[in-house]
Structure formats: structure tokens, C-alpha cells
Amino acid sequence: WEVKISADWHERFEELCAYQRAHGHCIVPRNYEENQSLGNWVSTQRRNKEHDRKQDPVWKKRFAQLEGLGFEWEVKISAE
């Protein structure tokens, strides 16, 4: 079970890397039409940080990977 979750996390992370290369940032809209799963996953990562999972060694590693990519933890919604 943990292996599946880990594989899913890494798959989404790779999708985020591709998104960052294409768009120059990691601000994936939650309702991103091209990849709804990625938009939901990004939102989940932000919630995970809010729950302060810093003691979890797996989360620490994932947090570092996201930070290294330039992940935006707090996103301001503009009224365009």
C-alpha cells in the first residue's frame, strides 16, 4: 500500500516538474483542465505543509524536493 502511494507521489512530482519546465512556475490551478490529478495533488501538498508534518522523514524528503523545484506554498488568488 505504501509503495503505491509513494509511486503515485513520484508520478505527480514528475508531472509537476514537466509543468514547471513548460510554464516557468509551480502554481498549478486546482481545476487544471489538462491534468486534474496534478491540480488536486498540488493542493494536497499545500495542505500537508499546513498540517506541519515536519517530523515525518518521508515528508521531509518530499518537502525538500518540492522546495528545490521552487514550489509555491502560499498562492494568492487574483481577481482577474
Image (cartoon, rainbow, N blue to C red):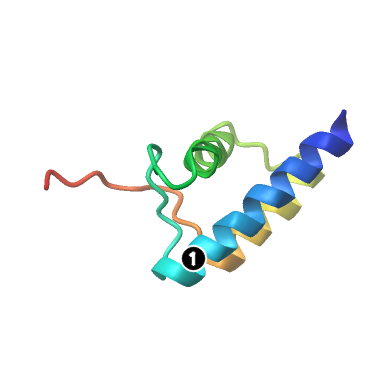
Farthest-out residue, left: 80
The x and y percentages for residue 16 are: 56, 56
As drawn, 50 above or below 13: above
The x and y percentages for residue 25 are: 42, 65
Q: Residues within 10 Å of mark 1 (few under 14, many from 20)?
A: some
Q: Nearer the viewer, residue 71 or 52?
A: 71
As drawn, 48 above or below 9: above
Residue 32 appears left or right of 43: left
The x and y percentages for residue 8 are: 73, 41
Residue 41 appears left or right of 58: left
Q: Nearer the viewer, residue 50 or 10?
A: 10
Q: Residue at x 53, y 44 (%)?
A: 38
Q: Nearer the viewer, residue 32 or 73?
A: 32
For the N terminus, the image quarter is top right
Q: Name the residue that disc number 1 marks.
A: 20
Residue 54 appears left or right of 37: right
Residue 57 appears left or right of 51: right
Q: Nearer the viewer, residue 46 or 33?
A: 33
The x and y percentages for residue 58 are: 79, 45
